[in-house]
Image: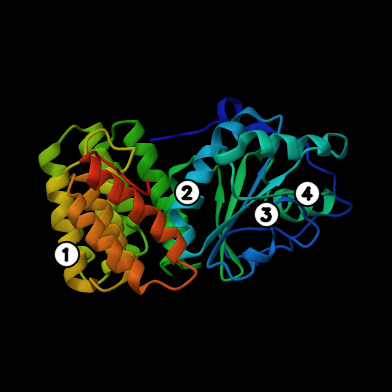
Amino acid sequence: MLTHTIAAFTCVATLFAAAQEPEKLKVGSAMPSLDNVEMVQGSKDNLTDAKVTVVEFWATWCGPCRKAIPHINDVAAANAWRGLRVLGVSTDSTDDKSKVKPFVDKMGSRMTYNVGWAGEGISRSWMEASGQKGIPTAFVCTNGKIAWIGHPMDDGFESAIRKCLSGRFDPELSPKGEQYLEAGRNAAKKKNWREASKHFDDCIALKPEIFVDAMEAKYQMLADQQKDAAAAKAWAADVAGKLSSSPVALAEFAVFVAQDARLQQHDLESAQVLIEGAMSAGGTKTDVLVAAARVASAAGKFDAAVDLQNKAWRQATPEQKPFLKSDLDAYKQAQAKGASAKVGQ
């Protein structure tokens, strides 16, 4: 599990001084304007209809930013079909503004999302207003409101995106849940398993389908930190019960167990049980079909992966089809080669 300190993982940026103290920006606040962002790659137009928008502040001179870019790119590509759009906003100085376009061009296929450059007003209204003094910093936004703020390599980044994409973001419960989750992770680092488990359980109890990330954190603690495969398997079975009426959330957890790169081992047997539960509760949902295809791929069942992904592609919207087709093609290639293809991680 990734943790970050400002010294090791974050570039401390000197942000522009504001004429007056800006209004505090936090989870639940309305998104500030992006009108004055000067585009370098892509367009702001495709952000308008996005289900979830990630606004990430970075700079060409920032080492941690450069390391995070391929990860952000992978997350953007894997979730584009669900309505995720990303805007990387450069905070390079006016003198260094000319360096941004060559940098993006050099990154090529590792940085294909929208990229722009920010003036002083943008930095004040986002970074300074939220008390963020270092980059990279990502803002996950949905329905015009901020749902999460943090480092794009933190565990919470992807879980916040998934939560918002499936309509499970709750501005009232999320701040309290994040406190429990952070306390649990801190306790787990200290190997205080009982305390960690209690914090994770308290988070989940707020509303299970919202806090799948707490379920994942507890599973990872059991499987990787405590090395207790039996307890991890039992917890996966408990999750199946807790999420029995939330097929999309259950499908997300199944994919996590089957192929998440943060896990040292993948319990494909448990993942299969989990995805079968999700299919039973909501097998016609595109999100569930795509997840089932990924679980099948992780298990090397490429015939099933192709069939499931094809079903998802056929019922997808015109906007979704190109993204789902790329994964379908990857499964077909793996099917032909008989090789593993864990698509969409």
Where residue 40 sits in the image (x, y, percent)? 74, 48
SS under mark 2: helix
Q: Earlier in the sequence, mark 1 or mark 2?
A: 2
The amino acid sitting under disc 1 is Gly
Give the Cα separation between the discs numbered 3 and 4.
Answer: 15 Å
Give the Cα separation between the discs numbered 2 and 3.
Answer: 17 Å
**Is label 3 in contact with label 4 (beta carbons under 8 Å)?**
no
SS under mark 4: loop
Q: What residue lies at 75% left-to-right and 42% top-to-bottom?
A: 91
The color scheme shown is rainbow
Q: What residue lies at 42% left-to-right and 61% top-to-bottom?
A: 163
Q: Quadrant of residue 341?
A: top left
Give the Cα separation between the discs numbered 4 and 1.
Answer: 46 Å
Q: Point out the frontmost of discs 3 and 4.
A: 3
Where residue 215 sits in the image (x, y, percent)? 29, 52
Q: Residues within 10 Å of mark 1 (few under 14, many from 20)?
A: many
Residue 213 in sight from this viewpoint: no
Q: Which mark is residue 75?
A: 2
**Is label 1 in contact with label 3 (beta carbons under 8 Å)?**
no
The amino acid sitting under disc 3 is Gly
Would you name the residue on which mark 4 appears? 118
Would you name the residue on which mark 3 appears? 42
